[in-house]
Image: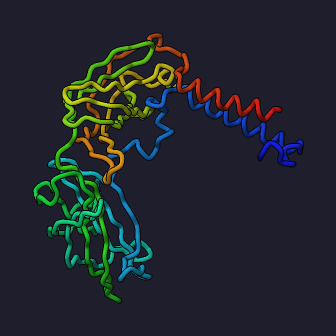
Amino acid sequence: APDDAPERADPAFRRERLRLAEERLQTYRTWAQYPPGSRPARENPDQLYPRNPVVRGIPLSLSGQPSEHIALKLRQDRMAVVGDETIQLGIRCEDSQGQVLPCAVESAQLSALPTDGVPPKGQRPVSFVADKTPEHEGELVATVRPLELQLVERTWPLRVDVKLRAGSDPVEQGTALFDFLFTPEPPAVPTGKIRETVVDGSLVLYYGLEVRRPGRYVLHARVDDSQGKTFAFLEWNDLLAVGPQEVKLVIFGKLLLDEKPRMPLKLRDFDGFLLKEGVDPDREHIPPRSGYHYTTQVYPSTMFSAKEWQSDERTRHEREFEHDVDDARK
């Protein structure tokens, strides 16, 4: 409220304002124990397993209207395709109880979505076949390698538009869509070289990249302990020049001491993208490295520091929140 607002003189209002200001300060201090690029895994549950398939349950679309009788379970094993990678798509037709219904794909076309005012260039047919594996029982599955289809020459959003017939009584005709981002030529590729060292009480992993296009990169990795428990989510967000580079992934010392992972540690699922501001699409993905691909040495806990993260950024934010507390006390 403005300084001259009548409610500012109300004791209850003043107490609540002070409580909220103190809560914001304490919440930030709790968060700022660790740096932004080295966080407890529990803070990012949606980003811990990037290679898990994306599954959506939606009604069959009948000329834009949802079917009352038939539902679709749509599965795709990734949202971004890089270089020569493939993407697998799955369709399962179900009734309201989740039981499999007859399902047939009449046609499926891959096309580039219009963006930045540029129209798509043509279409390519996609073939769906019945999946015989128990894991995908009742699914119609297609495997697409966009690079072979030569539909786009740079990073572009692609769509598979499926027309299908589902059910038996009644039989309904409708559509389903799959969208993903395709990067034909990755802006950087992992070299496979990783080295480690302890710096200022934190374990630092230097991750090798061969950078082809300069700019700001946002990169992620997950860290498990020797028992497979994921305890750390690492992020690197900074500029990279062209050529061989090393990205500094920090497993913060206090995070190691607080989470108490069992050594050795295992790095998995490295991925990321070149951020492109002011354009659409706004990123170019790099080839991911899936699964475990590096194991650290075994370190005693005495090698790591229990000190909280300190930086100009933290000091600046704390001062702002402290100012709010002081102002609320007046």
**Vertical comparison of 147 with 128: above or below:** above
Quadrant containing the C terminus in the rendered view: top right
Which residue is at the far top? 302
Task: Using residue 4 as the reference point, say whether residue 314 is left or right of it.
Answer: left
Give x and y (percent) for residue 97: 44, 74
Give x and y (percent) for residue 163: 25, 77
Q: Residue at x 35, y 89 (%)?
A: 170
Task: Using residue 48 as the reference point, say whether residue 2 is left or right of it.
Answer: right
Residues 324 and 233: in front is 324
How many numbered marks have been drawn onto this rendered protein structure?
0
Give x and y (percent) for residue 106: 20, 79
Give x and y (percent) for residue 217: 32, 36
Q: Residue at x 27, y 44 (%)?
A: 285
**Vertical comparison of 16 with 237: above or below:** below
Q: Residue at x 51, y 26 (%)?
A: 34
Residues 256 and 99: in front is 256
- Image quadrant where residue 142 sits: bottom left
Residues 300 and 126: in front is 126
Q: Residue at x 36, y 60 (%)?
A: 55
Which residue is at the far bottom? 170
